[in-house]
Amino acid sequence: MAHLGFREFLSNRSAPFVIILGANEIASAVAARLAREGYRVVLSHDPYPPVIRRGMSFHDALFQDRAEVDGIQGLRGETALEIVRVLSSPGVVAVTSLQLTDLIALRTPDVLVDARMQKSRMTTNLRNIANLAIGLGPHFAAGVNCDVAIETHPEHAGELVKAGETLPNDHMPRYLGGVGRGRFVYSARAGVWRTPLDVGARIFKDYLLGLLDGHRVLSPMDGFLRGIARDGAVVPENVKLVEVDPRGRAASWTGADEYGRAIADAAYCVIAKTAHPRCWARPVTESYH
């Protein structure tokens, strides 16, 4: 059975194979959207920056924890056979610590999506690695380092960039409950993060959230934890470590939000409209907003 599954996966008749770089909430929203349409999706985890919105992503599947986004389940796969086994089931995506060079050795991807959201790092050229390479967020330019670039700026989320680069990072977080940057805690130093808390926890201003390199980290306000780096994570300096949702009963920390779904819908429409007719037969469907 395993042999037949692997052979079918490698064949041209199998469903389109998509590699997504990153396992954050944006990468996971795209993965969930594509999995709903029958694509075989594997997310390649990148440790920088650390994932904090873990209830909105497939990240925790790497640790064998339950990870589900909009009805799609993420399962860990650390070998070729494990990944193929995961992808043999509908409504499931594979999550792995294997990197792109390992995954393209398994099978050339039909689509490659860079959703790492590395806002302060330069991006490598993704073109010619897959039939279609999509770049999400800053530092991408269509026809230069990707085939299609998609905006992730909050005011332009999901817009296609047909010429020039996507907008640069303006270091201005989206407002939530009337609060912008103030609802985040950034790492003041590099180190190992230790915390007993998880997403969804009710916390209060100056509440002890954990220790970073042995130094206390306190909550900036009352609310619920919308994001928090996983206990034991190795954290670089000056990255988001914690996010507080101040909206009270309206707070949410699971599943894709409207922002992620807008980007995911844009990515799916691009993929469906540029699909090779012999290999990808699925039409564009309505958004699942």
Image: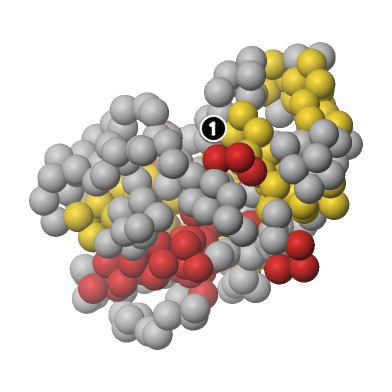
Q: Determine the residue positioned at 48% across, 61% down.
A: 260
Q: Determine the residue positioned at 11% across, 51% down.
A: 163
Residue with the most extreme front position: 178
Residue 135 as seen in the image, left or right of residue 118: left
Circle 1 is placed at which residue position?
Answer: 49
Task: State whether residue 27 is above or below residue 184.
Answer: below
Pick whichever, 57 or 133, lies toward us.
Answer: 57
Pick whichever, 153 or 142, lies toward us.
Answer: 153
Residue 11 shows in this picture? no
Q: How is the image coloured?
A: secondary structure
Task: State whether residue 214 is above or below residue 95.
Answer: above
Residue 168 as seen in the image, left or right of residue 256: left
Q: Quadrant of residue 218?
A: top right
Q: Determine the residue positioned at 59% across, 50% down.
A: 179
Where in the figure is residue 49, as x and y percent of width and height? 54, 32
Q: Which image quadrant: the N terminus?
A: bottom right
Q: Determine the residue positioned at 13% across, 45% down.
A: 164
Q: Quadrant of residue 16?
A: bottom left
Where in the figure is residue 227, as x and y percent of width and height? 68, 46
Residue 124 shows in this picture? yes
Amino acid type indicated by mark 1: Pro
Where in the figure is residue 151, as x and y percent of width and height? 31, 53
Residue 241 as seen in the image, left or right of residue 212: left
Pick whichever, 32 or 99, lies toward us.
Answer: 32
Task: State whether residue 5 is above or below residue 161.
Answer: below
Residue 66 as seen in the image, left or right of residue 161: right
Task: State whether residue 5 is above or below residue 184.
Answer: below
Where in the figure is residue 52, as x and y percent of width and height? 65, 42
